[in-house]
């Protein structure tokens, strides 16, 4: 699985909004500068996040972006879906839309299992978890495994 630049930037932008939630709307320029995200690219991402119901925007001098709902109700999966669509796809299709025959038949349950595991992790971590540096225990356990850090 690949995490696109859009998804990475989107999660970082939403996390920045979460830690600044009490400060009122945050300008895109501020997020871009603090998170080292190209400003024009971020504007498109923020538009996708707004259309996806993750952030709200306000125009004007006191305007900017803020979370559309509580950080504890926004999962990392919500953010990624808002900017990239389905979490796991095969050749651009959802695994449930695929059909294999013959010796390739075992691939479908493999792709479904992969999607289930990725979703379990990304839907189990909220923006509030990230903002508090408090990943859920199962995620911390997985990340603590030495093999998780190896690049085969």
Image (tube, grey):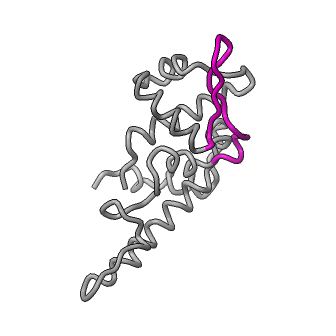
Q: Does the magenta stretch include residue 71?
A: yes
Please identify the residue farthest to the top as the structure is shown.
Answer: 61
| Residue 91 image-quadrant placement | bottom left
Quarter of the figure with residue 37: top left
In the displayed structure, 138 sits above or below 109; it is: above
- The x, y position of residue 115, in whole percent, is 46, 65
Q: Which residue is drawn at 64% across and 52% down?
A: 136
Residue at 50 percent of width and 51 percent of height: 143
Where is residue 92? Give x, y as percent: 34, 60
Decide if residue 144 is on the left or right side of residue 94.
right
Instruction: Identify the residue at image location x=45%, y=42%.
Output: 7
Q: What stretch is highlighted in magenta?
A: 53-74
User: Residue 68: where, in percent of width, then height?
Assistant: 68, 37
Residue 46, placed above or below residue 70: above
- Residue 141 drawn in magenta: no
Residue 124 in the image: above or below residue 133 = below
Left or right side of 142 for 19? right
């Amino acid at each position: 699985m690949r995490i696109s630049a859009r998804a990475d930037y989107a999660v970082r932008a939403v996390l920045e909004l979460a830690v600044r939630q009490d400060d009122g709307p945050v300008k895109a320029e501020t997020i871009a500068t603090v998170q080292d995200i190209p400003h024009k690219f971020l504007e498109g991402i923020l538009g996708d996040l707004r259309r996806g119901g993750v952030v709200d925007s306000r125009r004007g001098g006191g305007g900017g972006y803020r979370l559309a709902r509580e950080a504890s109700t926004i999962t990392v999966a919500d953010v990624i879906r808002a900017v990239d669509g389905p979490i796991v796809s095969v050749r651009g299709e959802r695994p449930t839309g695929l059909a294999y025959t013959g010796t390739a038949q075992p691939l479908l349950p493999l792709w479904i299992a992969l999607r289930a595991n990725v979703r379990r992790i990304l839907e189990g971590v909220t923006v509030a978890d990230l903002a508090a540096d408090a990943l859920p225990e199962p995620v911390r356990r997985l990340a603590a495994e030495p093999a998780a850090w190896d690049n085969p």
